Structure formats: structure tokens, C-alpha cells
Amino acid sequence: MISSLRRKFILIAMASLVGTMVVLCTAIAIGNHCIVTNRVDHVISVLRQNNGNFLPPGPRFDPSDFDFQITPETPFETRYFIVELTAQREIQSVNLEHIAALDRQTVVDTISQIINTGAERGYVGHYRFGVFPNEDGGNTMIVLDCFLQLQSANNMLRITIVIFLICILIVFILLLFLSRRAIRPFVDNLERQRQFITDASHELKTPLAILSANIGLLEDTWGADKWLESAKAQITRLDRLIKNLVELARTEETIREDAVEMFSVSEIAQASTDAFQPLAEADGKSLLTEIADGISTKGVQNNFFRLFSILLDNAVKYCDTAGTIRLSVSMRGRNICIAVSNPCTGVDTNQLSRYFDRFYRADSSRARSTGGYGIGLSTARAIVTRHKGRIFNHYTDGIITFTAVIPQVS
């Protein structure tokens, strides 16, 4: 249980970190790309306003005239070409004065791709284009080479991803070393709780034994009496409750290596069925089984005997009169599936998840009449969890089913 808690702590912490980092890295990448695209679009707009040049006619240069930072070197750092199109979107002229790295075929292919997109702005490869209408019905196409800008954005993305992975690795290593310390208070409280239950049970057994002996002497002296019988019944009930609490505390402990053995789940299921068959028939109920042969696993054998006993005992107690109880044991992939179902009227589906809580009883009066304490299903869940499985229930068409799914260990 402690190992499971530690794994969950690390998983939740890592999931939170990864989620936050992914959002942060995505925001940085999208923001950087938008900044690059916005700046390139400003460049294209300036070229459009000044008829293909960066500076309007005149000797004065004032950077404040532009929406982005521009220097006298900007015209020489920017590579672009301008295409004039007819109203039918056919190439009328191409100005390659400001770009030298393109041959005519590459220019024609790039222009064809841009025309095929039908968009007014966008990217084709590492080229950003803008298409503007002319007064004569044609269009002017300005195509900017954004290789350096996009390369810079991609390098920023790569650096961000590398930093992201390094941060994840560092945090994961730190969690491996610090997670034990983080869950230590919970572990200590859990151990103290288990120790308290064990110690309290031993302390209670002595006075219960003395009370039971005293009542026996009183019966020998005064004879049978209903009050003495009631006291004996309550002592027996309390003794059984203490034993169940101790069993639950021990079941929640981590499995020791020397307690693990290979055993047949199919044989345990059949033996448990044979034990409960007369009890079910005596109560006017039927017990049907569907147990697959040859299902074996490694674990604590006594725990599986107890698991089947709890589930079958619960089904027999709360099954409707003349109802049919069904037990199935099968394999689902690499998991052992144990399911026990029985008809049971009056189940509140909103309370199904609480059936595994300690001391919870859906029908207190019925539970008392059958001798229930509300601990059995808690013990079943502890056994399943101890073997790295999960247990759940569902209620459909008046039939309640408890299902345990436990990984097979060979």
C-alpha cells in the first residue's frame, strides 16, 4: 500500500508538472510564431505602401514612421520578390531585384502554389506572401523569404523542448528521492493506526475473556437467564468485531516475500463454493458457478480464501428470497476476474461506492439481523488492493455484482 501511495504521489506530481510545462511551452512556441508572422506581415505591408521599397521617396528616414523597428540595414537584410498578376491571376511580371537565391523555375513553382491556395496571406514553405488588389483588377503579390526568422523560431522551440525535458528529468529524480519523505507523515499515521488496532484488540481480549468466564459462573450458580444470554451474545459479537478489525489492519499491510506462494485460484473458488453451497440451500437460495480451470497466481493464499468467503457470505446474506447467486472466475487478458452477483431489491445506486467504506451498512436493520459489521467489503478491498488489483460494484435490473480484477503473477 505504501509503494502504491508513493507511485500515485509521483504520478500526480509528474502529471501536474508535465501538464503545466506543456501549456507553457506551447504558449511560448505559438507566441513566438505569432510575433515572427506579425513582424513579417508588417514588412509586407510597408513594401506594399511604398511600391516595393522599404522607404518612401525622400531623403529623410524616421524609424517612428513604422510599426516595427527598422534600421537603414533592413532593406539589405530582407529578401523578397514582387509579382504582378492579371485579373485572371496570370503572371504579368516578376521583380527579382531583391532576392538572388531563386532560379526562375523555383519562382514559378512558388507563385503557382500561392495562387492555388487562393488565400490573401499565408505561408508556402518558408515564404510568407501577401496578395493585394490593384485598381486595374489585377493583383500584386509580395513574397518574403522568412527562412532565417522561421529557423530562429524553430531553434527557440527546440531549446524550449530540451529545457522542458531536462526539467522533467530533474523533477522526476528529485521526486524519487523526496517522495518517501513527503508521504512519511501519512505512513507514520497509518502505522500508528494499525498498531493501535492491534494493541487495543489485545487489551480488550483480556476483559472480554474475564466477562465471559464470569457470566459462565453466574449461569452455573443461578441457571440460564435471558439477560445473561444477551450479555454472552454481545461479548461474542464484540470478540468477532475485534478479530475482524485486526484482520483488516493486517490485510492492509504490505505483502512480505516469505508469505508469497503459488496457488490455484480455481481450486480456492471451488472449495469456497462447496463450503457455502449448503448455507445457500438452507436459506432457500441457489448458488451457481462458472469457474475456469487452471487459473493460478502468486500471492497470499489465505487472503484469497478470505476474499471468496467475504463475497459469497455477503451474497448469501443479502440475496433476495429464492434468488440465484452466481460466481464466475475467468481470465481477462493478464488479469484474473472474480465476479459475484445476486438479486437484491431496494439498492440505492447513489450509495454503491460507499459499500467498501468501513462500518458502512446500506440497511442497518438488515445488517444487524444477519450479523454484519460493515467491515467485510472493506477487508475485500484491502485484499484486492494488496495484490495490486481493483474491486468495484454495479447494480443493473435488480442484480448487484461485485467484481474484483487482479493481475496474474507467475
Image: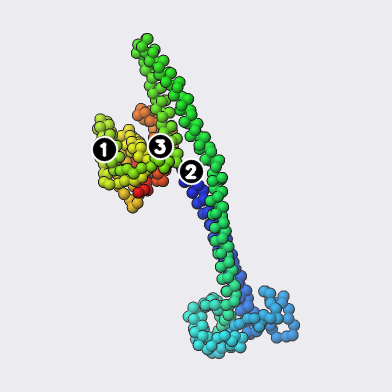
Above or below: residue 72 compared with residue 360? below
Residue at 59% of width from left, 76% of height from top?
148
Based on the displayed image, in which of its 4 quarters is residue 30 positioned?
bottom right
Provide the residue designation for mark 2. 2
**Earlier-in-chain disc, 2 versus 3:** 2
Q: Position of residue 355 (x, y in %)?
A: 41, 38
Of badges 1 and 2, the one in the foreground is 2
Provide the residue designation for mark 1. 287
Q: Position of residue 132 (x, y in %)?
A: 57, 81
Q: Which mark is residue 379?
A: 3
Q: SS for tag 2? A: helix
What is the spatial separation of the Cα atoms under label 1 and label 2, in whole angstroms? Answer: 37 Å
Q: Which mark is residue 352?
A: none
Residue at 33% of width from left, 51% of height from top?
332
Q: Position of residue 40 (x, y in %)?
A: 61, 76
Q: Residue furthest top?
A: 221
Q: Are marks 3 and 1 in contact (CB under 8 Å)?
A: no
Based on the displayed image, in which of its 4 quarters is residue 320 positioned?
top left
Comparing 248 with 234, the one in front is 248
Q: Position of residue 106 (x, y in %)?
A: 51, 85
